[in-house]
Image: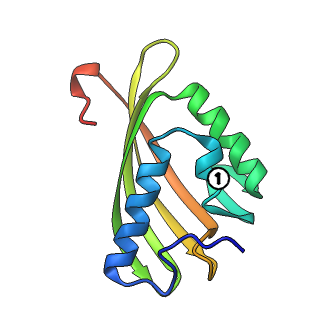
Amino acid sequence: MELKPPLPPFTEATAKQKVQAAEDAWNTRDAERVCMAYTEDSTWRNRGEFLNGREAIKAFLIRKWAKEHEYKLKKWLWSFTDNHISAKFEYEWHDDAGQWYRSYGNEQWEFASNGQMQRREASINDVPIDVSDRRL
């Protein structure tokens, strides 16, 4: 079993490290790298889509970043306990037509003892923005 430190139970410092590591990984837009943070049988709810397993997560991320051009993400720790972390985030991207969006959301994460995420639930809303309103 591959270890993905920091490991639960989390402290404020290690929870912040985990959130920063997720932000850094997602900003690479490398689906292979990102999906390795999740257990083989990880379950996700992303908006209205339900995914099961690392391969489904990888396929989802490939589709996501093919659509969301120039994706840039920022995450913040919201709360934590033992093996759970809640994070809030926003990211900016544009579609094929050049329309920019800022997507806002919240995530709840549950981790296995090896530090890989075994469950992720995300609620996300997209807001169209002008390119001049970009913050990230």
Q: Which residue is mark 1?
A: 35
Residue 4 location (% of width, % of height): 56, 70
Q: Amino acid at mark 1?
A: Cys
Q: Is 99 left or right of 116, judged from the image as shown? A: left
The residue shown at (49%, 61%) is: 107
The answer, for residue 134, to whether it is visible in the render is yes
Dot 1: few (<14), some (14–19), or many (≥20) neighbours within 10 Å? Answer: many
The answer, for residue 47, to whether it is visible in the render is no
Q: Is 89 left or right of 3, judged from the image as shown? A: left
The residue shown at (62%, 42%) is: 31
Asked which quadrant contains residue 71, the reply is top left
Quadrant location, the N terminus: bottom right
Given residues 32 and 127, the one toward you in this image is: 32
Given residues 93 and 14, the one toward you in this image is: 14
In the rendered view, tell whether residue 94 sits above or below residue 50.
above
* Secondary structure of residue under mark 1: helix
Residue 49 location (% of width, % of height): 68, 49
Quadrant location, the C terminus: top left
